């Protein structure tokens, strides 16, 4: 157990807010005690970030930003094992998944370093395409937003922080990050790595604490020019309502649908979707939750899905064999059990699971869950998959789109016409053909429609979100053009 604080001006210090006790979700042992932030601490963090941006970062040449990002990537790799242990201990993430997360975070900073050196930052405009524009030269350039508030969840605390911090620093912004209360230690470790990369004090500050003491003062401060959030719909709504006139990117909830057509391999697809639905207790916003399977193969598919679910290893997240660790909180566990009971009372059938196992639930498959049940319309964020049959592709697409969410979906088919039709008709931010909704990499635009959010992540696309276009016009000669 360690005594930790917050991070301001390239140094950890005790906050003046309440003491936060961080416990392992697996066995409840105390991981750390955090002297968390007060509103005065948040003000100091924002002031630090504003100085770093105004005095240094906005003027830092691209090659220096690129070099710093590479140092951060190297620092993550150098502390790989320590970071993995921390993510496992404070977040309960199985070690096999934590290793992938840390490797991906390092790669993400490397990608940002490459893009700083190669990404076009503007365009020359043909000013004489408009009458009166003769003798004028115009171009656009991308400039940093300034100070960015980053709200990071607990399920992938390093990688989802990297998704925000890397593109922000790449564009010359400063960041004040608020990690989840469950996973603050990994955020402090990332701040140490950023400091060691040689960036100025204030480039990344970390405030830890309650909504009233830390989150609200951060997102409402006028010096914060952008807020980027990964979290639930309630969090996104609250921030959108209170942040004021700022840029927002909101990566929110999902109940990801996956359609399995009659020409798909039912056994191989069931195994793929079992991993997508249940790995890490299903605690990913793009986990396969709603499985929509053609009626001609649903019996074979469901039998294999149940076998795969029952074969998954539940246990100590420190064990490399463990595939399913604890849920993040006891309250969420209780909510999922209530939702399962509700679905059963409305006529759903539990094919496997549906019961508590230590600090999680056994991988659960429910068939024919009514539309009014919570598991049909809310994000489970747990090891639960619902199974429904379809006969026509129109019916399948309607079931996918009958949701408040629209983040990612999967479609399994060998028919090219069906695939292209799905791309036009399925209302999501990203569609994977012959892969599950859970697959993600960081070089494509990731983000949702409807209540799944606003804006896009993915390094290049986040860099665009975290900058603004500025136009520069030059009158080269007096050629008779009228003033604007």
Image (tube, rainbow, N blue to C red):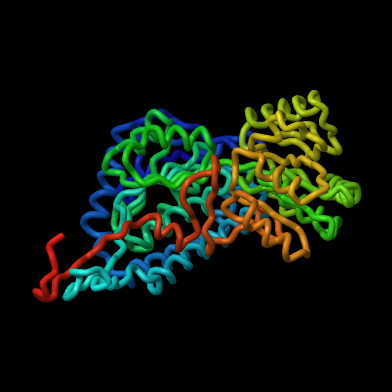
- Residue 350 image offset from top left, x and y in percent: 84, 34
- Residue 115 image offset from top left, x and y in percent: 42, 69
Residue 475 in the figure: left or right of residue 36: left
Viewer-side residue, 344 vs 206: 344
Residue at position x 72%, y 29% from top? Answer: 373
Residue at position x 51%, y 44% from top? Answer: 453
**The image quarter in which residue 59 lies:** bottom left
Residue 94 in the figure: left or right of residue 71: right
167 above or below 135? Answer: above
- Residue 189 image offset from top left, x and y in percent: 46, 51
The outermost residue toward the left is: 478
Task: Locate the C terminus by quadrant.
Answer: bottom left
Residue at position x 86%, y 50% from top? Answer: 301
Viewer-side residue, 225 vs 129: 129
Viewer-side residue, 78 vs 206: 206
The reply to whether residue 413 is visible in this rendering is yes
The outermost residue toward the front is: 131
The reply to whether residue 75 is visible in this rendering is no
Residue 199 in the figure: left or right of residue 354: left
- Residue 259 image offset from top left, x and y in percent: 75, 51
């Amino acid at each position: 157990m360690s005594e930790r604080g917050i991070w301001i001006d390239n140094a950890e210090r005790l906050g003046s807010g309440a003491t936060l006790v961080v416990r392992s979700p697996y066995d409840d042992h105390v991981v750390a005690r955090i002297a968390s932030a007060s509103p005065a601490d948040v003000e100091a963090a924002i002031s630090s970030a504003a100085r770093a941006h105004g005095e240094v970062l906005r003027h830092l040449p691209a090659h220096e930003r690129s070099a710093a990002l590479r140092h951060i990537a190297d620092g993550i790799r150098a502390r790989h094992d320590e970071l993995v242990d921390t993510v496992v201990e404070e977040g309960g993430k199985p070690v096999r998944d934590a290793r992938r997360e840390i490797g991906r975070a390092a790669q993400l900073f490397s990608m940002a370093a490459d893009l700083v050196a190669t990404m076009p930052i503007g365009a020359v405009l043909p000013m004489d395409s408009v009458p009166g524009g003769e003798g004028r030269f115009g171009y656009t350039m991308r400039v940093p937003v300034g100070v960015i508030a980053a709200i990071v969840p607990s399920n992938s605390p390093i990688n989802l922080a990297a998704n925000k911090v890397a593109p922000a620093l790449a564009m010359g912004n400063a960041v004040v990050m608020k990690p989840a209360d469950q996973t603050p230690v990994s955020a402090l470790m990332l701040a140490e790595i950023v400091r060691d990369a040689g960036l100025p004090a204030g480039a990344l500050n970390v405030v830890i604490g309650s909504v009233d003491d830390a989150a609200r003062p951060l997102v409402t401060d006028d010096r914060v020019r952008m807020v980027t959030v990964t979290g639930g719909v309630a969090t996104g709504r609250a921030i959108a309502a209170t942040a004021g006139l700022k840029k927002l990117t909101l990566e929110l909830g999902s109940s990801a649908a996956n359609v399995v057509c009659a020409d798909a391999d039912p056994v191989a697809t069931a195994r793929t979707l079992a991993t997508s639905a249940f790995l890490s207790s299903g605690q990913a916003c793009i986990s396969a939750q709603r499985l929509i399977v053609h009626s001609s193969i649903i019996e074979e598919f469901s039998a294999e899905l149940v076998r795969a679910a029952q074969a998954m290893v539940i246990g100590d997240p420190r064990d490399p064999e463990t595939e399913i660790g604890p849920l993040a909180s006891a309250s969420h566990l209780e909510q999922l059990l209530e939702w399962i009971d509700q679905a059963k009372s409305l006529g759903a059938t539990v094919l496997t699971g549906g019961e508590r196992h230590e600090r999680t639930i056994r991988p659960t498959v429910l068939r024919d869950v009514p539309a009014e049940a919570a598991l049909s319309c809310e994000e489970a964020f747990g090891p639960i998959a619902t199974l429904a049959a379809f006969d026509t592709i129109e019916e399948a697409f309607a079931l996918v789109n009958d949701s408040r969410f629209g983040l990612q979906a999967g479609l399994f088919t060998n028919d090219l016409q069906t695939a292209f039709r799905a791309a036009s008709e399925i209302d999501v931010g990203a569609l994977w053909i012959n892969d599950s909704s859970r697959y993600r990499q960081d070089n494509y635009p990731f983000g949702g429609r409807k209540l799944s959010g606003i804006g896009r992540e993915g390094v290049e696309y986040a860099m665009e979100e975290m900058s603004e276009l500025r136009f520069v016009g030059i009158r080269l000669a007096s050629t008779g053009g009228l003033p604007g």
